Each structure stands twice: as C-alpha cells, then as structure tokens.
Amino acid sequence: MIVEYFPETDMLYIKLAEGVSAESEEIAPGIVLDFDEENRLVGIEIEDASSRLNISRLEIRALPLAQLILTERKLVHPIPG
C-alpha cells in the first residue's frame, strides 16, 4: 500500500494494489474509488484532502508490516525558510 499526497492539487491517493485503473466511481463528493479490469479495488482518491483530513499526521496501528519504506518527494519550488 502506498499513500501519496500531491500538494499542487491537494489530492491524497491511497494505492491499495498494483494494477491500472480501468474504472472509477465517485462514492461521495471528492472521494473516488479506482477499480482494475477485474473489478478489484486498486486505489482511493481524496480531493481537497487538507480540508477533509489531518494530513500532517500518519498513524499506523497493528499492521503486519514486513518492510516499512519512508520516502519524501522533493518540491519543485521549495519554500525558503
């Protein structure tokens, strides 16, 4: 599973499985589920994420993780400070 935030569009994407989205369904305003060709859920898109969620904190509980990989995307135009 990959959780990625795109600040330029304020969109949070949760990639649940490998695969290409073949169909999407908006289940609530700004919440879109992506399905592959076999109708398996592969991702969740949350628009206007910063107004819907506290994106400054991520808490992981009781997941049987074999490997945890932390990565950070570099901003194209970093804010000085």
Image (tube, helix red, strand yellow):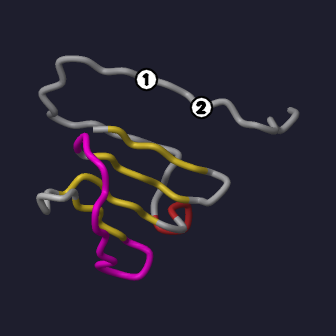
Residue at 12%, 27% (x, y): give it: 64
Between disc 2 and disc 1, the foreground one is 2
| Residue 40 included in the magenta stretch of the image | no
Q: Residues within 10 Å of mark 1 (few under 14, many from 20)?
A: few
Q: Which residues are magenta?
A: 17-31
Q: Residue 51 at x, y = what percent? A: 55, 68
Q: Quadrant of residue 48?
A: bottom right
Q: Which residue is mark 1?
A: 70
Q: Residue 65 at x, y = what percent? A: 18, 24
Residue at 29%, 78% (x, y): give it: 27
Q: Residue furthest bottom?
A: 29
| Residue 19 included in the magenta stretch of the image | yes
The amino acid marked with disc number 1 is Leu
Q: Which residue is mark 2?
A: 73
Nearer to us in this view, 42 or 49: 42
Q: Quadrant of the C terminus?
A: top right
**Rendered position, 8 above or below 16:** below
Residue at 21%, 57% (x, y): give it: 36
